[in-house]
Image (cartoon, rainbow, N blue to C red):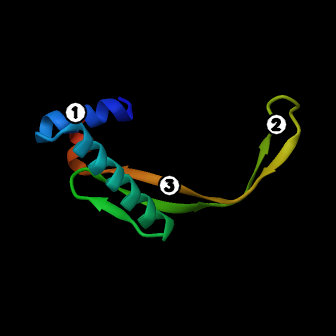
Amino acid sequence: MNKAELIDAIASDAGLTKADAKKALDSFIKATTGALKKGDRVALVGFGSFSVAKREKRKGRNPQTGKEITIPAKKVVKFKAGAELANVVK
């Protein structure tokens, strides 16, 4: 499902226009992005939670040359599914 299909699904399920559904989805994305950027956790009970974790630097290999490289540390976004979502997709 891509963003346009998600907007269509939200609009039909919630009885909104596609424009209103797009505004709602864009607002959710903006709010979630802002919270994660500040290092906050976003929890949606039953669905799951988004959080930021720090990945330490590590060694890897260039697949073309086989040469060992150092992969720098960075922050990554993690998603952990909630119990209800996990039970639905079993």
Residue labelled with disc 2: 62
Mark nearer the N terminus (1 vs 2): 1
Which is more foreground, mark 2 or mark 3?
A: 3
Task: Name the residue rendered at 33%, 55% in the picture.
Answer: 27
- Name the residue at 22% across, 58% down: 45
The image position of residue 7, as x and y in percent, is: 28, 37
Residue 50 picture quarter: bottom left
Q: Is residue 23 shown left or right of residue 65?
A: left
Q: Residues at badges 2 and 3 in contact (C-beta under 8 Å)? A: no
Query: Which of these two is toward me, 89 or 23?
Result: 23
**Residue, disc 1:** 9
Residue drawn 22% across the image and 33% down it:
9
| Whether residue 19 can be seen here | yes
Q: Which residue is denoted by mark 3 in the rendering? A: 77
Amino acid under label 2? Asn
The answer to which of marks 1 and 3 sits earlier in the sequence is 1
Secondary structure under the numbered disc 3 in the rendered image = strand
As drawn, is 58 to the left or to the right of 23? right
